[in-house]
Image (tube, helix red, strand yellow):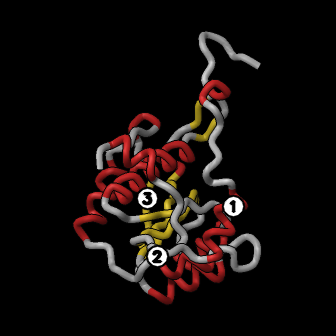
Amino acid sequence: MDFNEVVLTRKSIRSFTDKQIPDDVLQEMFTASQVAPSFQNRQCWRYIVVKDIKKRRELALKSGLVGKVNFFIKEAPVIIVACADTSKSGTMNGQDYYLVDVAISFQQMMLAAWNNGIGSCWLAAFNENSVKKILDIPDKIRVVAMSPFGYPKEKTSLYSKAVKTFAGSKKRIELDKMIFQETWES
């Protein structure tokens, strides 16, 4: 795919086949994340790759904020947990940049994955302490996001359709409502 096609067609995937992701494709995804810009190029991101079915099930069933909302992630052959070593980032104008740093890096990974036909779904609805316990993540490390990665099923699940509708995934703010010229417009 060309770059615009990758960006314009990427979407959240919640139904996966069991086809494994080749190591060279995973390497390409991590290389894309590695070259992301960051606060003073400190590269605070750290990733945990979870392939073990027991760990994936545990994350799926024990990490949600409400009930078992993340149960669908166990289907994916890989779950990647995006973490930050906050000591490797910085604060400017009262804003912690580790969140920005990891978000840029993780998004580049997701775009590289989609370029290879691999879907993902950015997850923030998780209990950080539960994820840390499941994956033995040190206290000083923050869990920023996680995502299942895998080849999309051709037919999406009823759950996937319901979440897509609830989340309003296709809705986008009109360009003239988000871009201002020279000054802020009300």
**Image location of residue 154, percent across then percent down:** 45, 73
Q: Which is more foreground, mark 1 or mark 3?
A: 1
Rendering quarter of residue 160: bottom right
| Residue ranking furthest to the left | 24
Amino acid type of disc 2? Answer: Phe
Numbered disc 2: secondary structure = loop
Left/right placement of residue 54 relative to residue 21 reads right
Q: Residue at x 50, y 84 (%)?
A: 55
- Real-space Cα distance between discs 2 and 1? 19 Å
Q: Which mark is residue 46?
A: 3
Upstream in sequence: badge 1 or badge 3: 3
Upstream in sequence: badge 2 or badge 1: 2
Q: Residue at x 35, y 63 (%)?
A: 117
Relative to 48, say whether 68 is above or below.
below
Rendering quarter of residue 131: bottom right
Amino acid type of disc 3? Answer: Arg
**Crowd rating for badge 1 (residues with CA inside 10 Å; few <14, some 14–19, many 20+):** few
The residue wearing badge 2 is: 16
Q: Which mark is residue 165?
A: 1
Q: Residue at x 52, y 76 (%)?
A: 135
**Crowd rating for badge 3 (residues with CA inside 10 Å; few <14, some 14–19, many 20+):** some
| Residue ranking furthest to the top | 182
Upstream in sequence: badge 2 or badge 3: 2
- Badges 2 and 1: C-beta atoms under 8 Å apart? no
Left/right placement of residue 21 relative to residue 137 reads left
Numbered disc 1: secondary structure = helix
Amino acid type of disc 1? Answer: Thr
- Front residue of 103 and 111: 111
- Real-space Cα distance between discs 2 and 3? 25 Å
**Image location of residue 12, percent across then percent down:** 53, 60
